[in-house]
């Protein structure tokens, strides 16, 4: 069983999330995380899907996904050639007394306090899964009250763009799609 | 060119522009606006008695013509009644477009009267689907639906249209171009794959052509014949492929799988190479997967890349339309053969001997009652291979697969993937509409018939004279067979008592059909001839057959194909075979 990050460009159309989620569920593929958001092109959204492939090969997952008409392009992003990040918002028990200790942790991880009151503070951090989990471990001793974490998002390193490469799509003349053309 | 009209008229114009000549459906509130322009349309609308019938009829039509079948229903219950035929069409890769009315867009999500999220419900088993709330989107959605349904690996597409989108005024503009950035079926196989496949074929001394329904979808029977005769290997045709290669051909070994011939099952098991064409290694073919054809390399040619490697690793994957793929393979193989090829003689000798030793057969019932296999054999013999045969699901389906002689593609229709009881009568209706000059025999079970026989009313009223042979064993026979074999003959809820109730002859008569009955072997031919002579009315023949007949051979579910039985507790005599 191993973890893979897929960057999936989908048409920005209603129901596309349900189609993807439904596919994973009915074919019994495990999703670790899924994040959806806009891209530089308003007609296209990007889903970043982290999957754990067990008996099904990664290739099979990709091919099934690719069959969805709204899925335009799928790329596997390897850790080595992509930048990957999650967003963490965590509320810890902290007061002015241990503020100094908290600050030391936050400095180490480049995290920031985004809200605070007398006995709690909310911290925001971004980073890859390992960094986020280390930060959480470091904050544990202050008492974690609540946390919210996003799915992973990832982008290829270098100047290339998935969308550039995939959007040069040809149109299909409807004459080729007419009923009569399927006749034997 | 654009014209102002209602969304409903735009829908009907779109269907006409897509080339639709017939559709099957039932109106209701949400789809009602569309039925007004349908009234004036050149498209023939056949008013069915149940939406499930509309869906299977569209499937039958599509299966015999190769065109996209069309069904239409209202929102809520009308739409949910299409669920079974859509799932059926998805499993058997049938090109369908289903149009459903939806509640007005402002009411969507409010649990309005007759609201059902049919787009959500059908997502898992449509190739694609749409919910249209803007009338301007109707022509594009219809054009895309037909294109998606009919190209690549065919499948069902549903277009759900909100009532207000049908009522509002719109400009009808038939799109001249479609843009589907995520949909590009690959038709042409890669050169390297063809070369690799040809090389494997030349090296193989025990090849088998494992042929699936894809060959029929691709209209590639002629190409298949050339390939088969070039390679000289045994050909097995799956349940979905019957007719793609003539039964009478000396290389034909019959159907593989759970109720396949000993020859076909064993040829696959012992092969060193499976030349897989448009088949998908379904569990009913492979038996226990880990023991399936363990010594075989696999060439897997299919238009759907997701089928390749799904169940069985492919040594040589070939993605493409089978007509193109087979046409490309033939010269490549000739080139390889020119350099030399393995000797097939020992393989063919042993397989031919095996086939001759274990032909399909059955014992006549000892009590002198009617044998179901005999009835089916006679229907085939007296009607011939130009007719279209449509089965339900159960024992009669397997006997129809085994004992009808198929010579031509698109003459055998059945629900292979989903196994939908109730398929036969409506699918036969659709088949007859698509091929009005052909004789269409539904070979149905007494159980299946009672699920959808109301479409005979549709047939009677619309001049669709199909013939139905009810193989009446007064049971859910296939289930009963499993109870005989695996549940110590405890026949829980499989007795239908259908030799007592209903009276199928009266039922046929009540539905405007000719009803006939037959329970003696000596009457079978005369009754079939009588039924074949009636062409102005549907005919139903109640063949009252031996109840305890069983389907053999059989590979029990989940077991290895090596454990095939030719009769109860009877395995082929492997020791006397040199394999
Ligand atoms: C809709 C549906 N319900 C249940 C089944 C399970 N099933 C498979 S075969 C069968 C019996 C069919 O009986 P009949 O039509 O009389 O055919 P026979 O096997 O007797 O030839 C049943 C209940 C099914 N395939 N489809
Ligand atoms: Mg029965």
Image: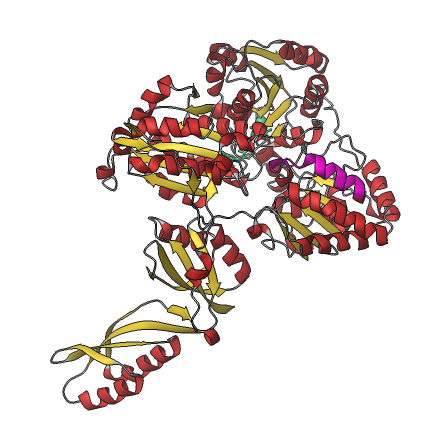
At x 52% / y 68%, what residue is drawn? Answer: A1
Taking the view exactly as shown, the residue that stands out farthest to the left is A118
Q: Nearer the viewer, residue B393 or B225?
A: B225
Question: What is the count of numbered marks?
Answer: 0
B159 left or right, relative to B330: left
A161 left or right, relative to B94: left
Residue B75: in magenta span: no
Q: Position of residue B4 (x, y in %)?
A: 28, 28
Instruction: Give residue B439's quadrant in the image.
Output: top right
Quarter holding ligand 1: top right
Taking the view exactly as shown, the residue that stands out farthest to the front is B1
Q: Is residue A168 above or below residue B533?
A: below
Q: Position of residue B344 (x, y in %)?
A: 85, 48
Q: Main secondary structure of the magenta part?
A: helix
- Let me know if residue B579 appears in the view: yes
- Let me know if residue B552 appears in the view: no
Quarter in which the C terminus of chain A is drawn: top right
Q: Is residue B394 above or below residue B425?
A: below
Q: Nearer the viewer, residue B394 or A184?
A: A184
Q: Position of residue B203 (x, y in %)?
A: 81, 55
Task: State how the image is colored.
Answer: secondary structure
Q: Position of residue B7 (x, y in %)?
A: 30, 30
At x 40% / y 69%, what residue is drawn? Answer: A155
The boundaries of the magenta stretch are B216-230
B496 left or right, relative to B173: right
At x 81% / y 34%, what residue is drawn? Answer: B250
Instruction: Give residue B438's quadrant in the image.
Output: top right
Residue B226: in magenta span: yes
């Amino acid at each position: 069983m191993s973890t893979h990050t897929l960057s999936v460009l989908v048409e920005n159309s209603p129901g596309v999330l349900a189609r993807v989620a439904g596919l994973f569920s009915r074919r019994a593929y495990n999703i670790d995380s899924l994040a959806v958001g806009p891209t530089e092109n308003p007609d296209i959204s990007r889903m970043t899907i982290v999957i754990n492939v067990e008996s099904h090969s990664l290739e099979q997952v990709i091919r099934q996904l690719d069959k969805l008409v709204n899925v335009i392009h799928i790329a596997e992003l390897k850790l080595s050639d992509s930048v990957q990040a999650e967003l963490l918002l965590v509320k810890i028990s902290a007061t002015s007394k241990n503020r100094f200790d908290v600050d030391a942790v936050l400095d180490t991880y480049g995290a920031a306090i985004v809200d605070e009151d007398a006995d709690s503070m909310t911290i925001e951090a971004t980073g890859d899964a390992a960094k986020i989990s280390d930060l959480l471990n470091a904050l544990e001793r202050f008492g974690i009250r609540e946390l919210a974490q996003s799915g992973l998002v990832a982008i290829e390193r270098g100047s290339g763009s998935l969308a550039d490469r995939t959007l040069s799509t040809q149109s299909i003349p409807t004459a080729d799609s007419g009923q009569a053309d399927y006749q034997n | 060119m654009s014209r102002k009209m209602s969304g409903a008229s735009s829908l009907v114009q779109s269907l006409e522009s897509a080339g639709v000549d017939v559709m099957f459906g039932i109106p209701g509130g949400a789809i009602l606006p569309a039925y007004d322009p349908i009234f004036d349309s050149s498209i023939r609308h056949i008013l069915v008695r149940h939406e499930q019938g509309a869906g299977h009829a569209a499937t039958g039509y599509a299966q015999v013509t190769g065109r996209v079948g069309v069904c239409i229903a209202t929102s809520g219950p009308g739409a949910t009644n299409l669920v079974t035929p859509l799932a059926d069409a998805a499993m058997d890769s049938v090109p369908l477009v289903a149009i459903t009315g939806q509640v007005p867009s402002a009411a969507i999500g409010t649990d309005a009267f007759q609201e059902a999220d049919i787009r959500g419900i059908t997502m898992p088993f449509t190739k694609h689907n749409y919910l249209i709330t803007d009338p301007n989107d109707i022509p594009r959605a219809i054009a895309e639906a037909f294109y998606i349904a009919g190209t690549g690996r065919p499948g069902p597409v549903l277009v759900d249209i909100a009532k207000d989108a049908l009522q509002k005024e719109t400009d009808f503009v038939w799109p001249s171009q479609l843009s589907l950035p995520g949909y590009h079926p690959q038709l042409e196989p890669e050169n390297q794959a063809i070369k690799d496949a040809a090389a494997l074929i030349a090296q193989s001394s025990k090849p088998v052509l494992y042929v699936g329904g894809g060959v029929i979808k691709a209209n590639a029977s002629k190409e298949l014949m050339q390939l088969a005769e070039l390679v000289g290997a045994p050909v097995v045709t799956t349940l979905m492929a019957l007719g793609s290669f003539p039964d009478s051909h000396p290389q034909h070994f019959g159907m593989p799988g759970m109720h396949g011939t000993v020859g076909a099952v064993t040829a696959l098991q012992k092969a060193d190479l499976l030349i897989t064409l448009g088949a998908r290694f379904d569990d009913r073919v492979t038996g226990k997967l880990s023991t399936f054809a363990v010594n075989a390399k696999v060439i897997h040619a299919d238009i759907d890349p997701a089928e390749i490697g799904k169940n069985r690793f492919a040594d040589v994957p070939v993605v493409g339309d089978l007509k193109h793929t087979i046409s490309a393979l033939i010269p490549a193989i000739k080139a390889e053969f020119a350099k030399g090829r393995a000797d097939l003689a020992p393989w063919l000798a042993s397989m031919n001997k095996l086939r001759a030793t274990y032909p399909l057969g059955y014992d006549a019932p000892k009590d002198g009652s009617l044998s179901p296999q005999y009835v089916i054999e006679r229907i085939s013999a007296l009607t011939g291979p130009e007719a279209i045969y449509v089965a339900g699901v159960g024992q009669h389906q397997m006997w129809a697969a085994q004992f009808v002689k198929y010579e031509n593609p698109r003459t055998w229709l059945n629900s292979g993937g989903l196994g939908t009881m109730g398929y036969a009568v409506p699918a036969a209706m659709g088949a007859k509409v698509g091929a009005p000059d052909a004789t269409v025999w539904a070979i149905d079970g007494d159980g299946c018939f009672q699920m959808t026989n109301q479409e005979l009313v549709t047939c009677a009223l619309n001049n669709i004279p199909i013939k139905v042979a009810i193989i009446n064993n007064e049971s859910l026979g296939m289930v009963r067979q499993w109870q005989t074999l695996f549940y110590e003959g405890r026949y829980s809820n499989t007795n239908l008592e259908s030799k007592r109730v209903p009276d199928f002859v009266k039922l046929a008569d009540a539905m405007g059909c000719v009803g006939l009955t037959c329970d003696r072997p000596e009457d079978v031919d005369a009754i079939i001839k009588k039924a074949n002579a009636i062409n102005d009315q549907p005919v139903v023949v109640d063949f009252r057959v031996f109840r305890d007949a069983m389907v053999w051979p059989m590979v029990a579910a989940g077991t290895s194909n090596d454990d095939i039985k030719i009769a109860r507790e009877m395995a082929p005599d492997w020791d006397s075979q040199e394999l």
